[in-house]
């Protein structure tokens, strides 16, 4: 928070989470496909309280609802227009896809998720923990983002986010104000 704010003083932060759909065979009671835990704020204590409030969920199977989480964040957070928009996602599991369990999985596809992210102009930084798959790489690539690999420790996440932000491509467009 502090490192990013020192570089971009008006940056804002939100927290969203995902587990899986709360019904069998994907998940169970208490699971959810997407949750906006804290909309954008400039207040560090509000943001860190939202992070501290996150709990670990397991779903009912190995893949989880990352596509629903990304699409939900793109469509439900209060993004400021004309700003640089970044989602940093970390996970240690594969993403559920609509063809799972005989084509009955209710979540969005990779294409639907990428379309929602691109429609909002969001770049994804994929923070790959052990167990994450190349699905993260595909989402990051399709949104002009980057991939950072970490170990299993949550202490590496902040460093990975900063590394991912440093790796984002930036386009500078000059705007001529006056000319003789």
Image (spheres, rainbow, N blue to C red):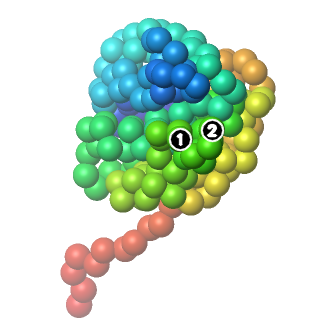
Residue 41 located left or right of residue 145: left
The quadrant in which residue 56 appears is: top right
Q: Is residue 8 left or right of residue 169?
A: left
Q: Residue at left 53%, top 33%?
A: 65
Q: Nearer the viewer, residue 54 or 177?
A: 54
Residue 101, which numbered label? 2
Is residue 48 shown left or right of residue 146? left
Residue linked to disc 1? 104
Label 2 environment density (alpha carbons within 10 Å; few <14, some 14–19, many ≥20) = few
Q: Quadrant of residue 152?
A: top right
Of residues 179 and 120, the one nearer the viewer is: 120
- Where is residue 71? Give x, y as percent: 42, 44
Image: 51 above or below 21: above
- Give how far across and how far down residue 78 sits, in percent: 26, 38
User: Is residue 167 depicted above or below 26 in this figure?
Assistant: below
Q: Quadrant of residue 100?
A: top right
- The quarter of the picture where the C terminus appears is bottom left
Numbered circles on residues, count:
2
| Crowding near the residue tagged with mark 1, few <14, some 14–19, many ≥20 C-alpha atoms within 10 Å | few
Q: Which mark is residue 155?
A: none
State the residue at coordinates (69%, 27%): 62
Residue 74 seen in the current view: yes
Q: Is residue 152 left or right of residue 27?
A: right
- Label 1–label 2 contact, CB within 8 A: yes
Taking the spot 59% from the left edge, 30% from the top edge, the residue there is 64
> Is 135 located above or below residue 14 in the figure?
below
């Amino acid at each position: 928070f502090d490192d990013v704010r020192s570089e971009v003083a008006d940056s804002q932060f939100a927290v969203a989470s995902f587990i899986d759909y709360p019904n069998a065979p994907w998940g169970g009671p208490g699971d959810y496909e997407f949750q906006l835990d804290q909309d954008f704020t400039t207040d560090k204590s509000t943001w860190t309280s939202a992070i501290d409030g996150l709990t670990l969920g397991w779903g009912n199977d190995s893949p989880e609802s990352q596509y629903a989480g990304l699409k939900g964040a793109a469509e439900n957070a209060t993004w400021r227009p004309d700003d640089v928009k970044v989602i940093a996602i970390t996970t240690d599991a594969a993403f559920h896809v609509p063809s799972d369990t005989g084509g009955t999985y209710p979540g969005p596809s990779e294409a639907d998720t990428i379309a929602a992210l691109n429609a909002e102009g969001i770049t994804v930084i994929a923070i790959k923990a052990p167990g994450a798959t190349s699905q993260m790489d595909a989402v990051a690539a399709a949104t002009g983002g980057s991939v950072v690999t970490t170990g299993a420790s949550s202490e590496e996440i902040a460093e990975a986010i900063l590394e991912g932000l440093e790796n984002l491509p930036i386009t500078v467009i000059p705007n001529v104000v006056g000319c003789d």
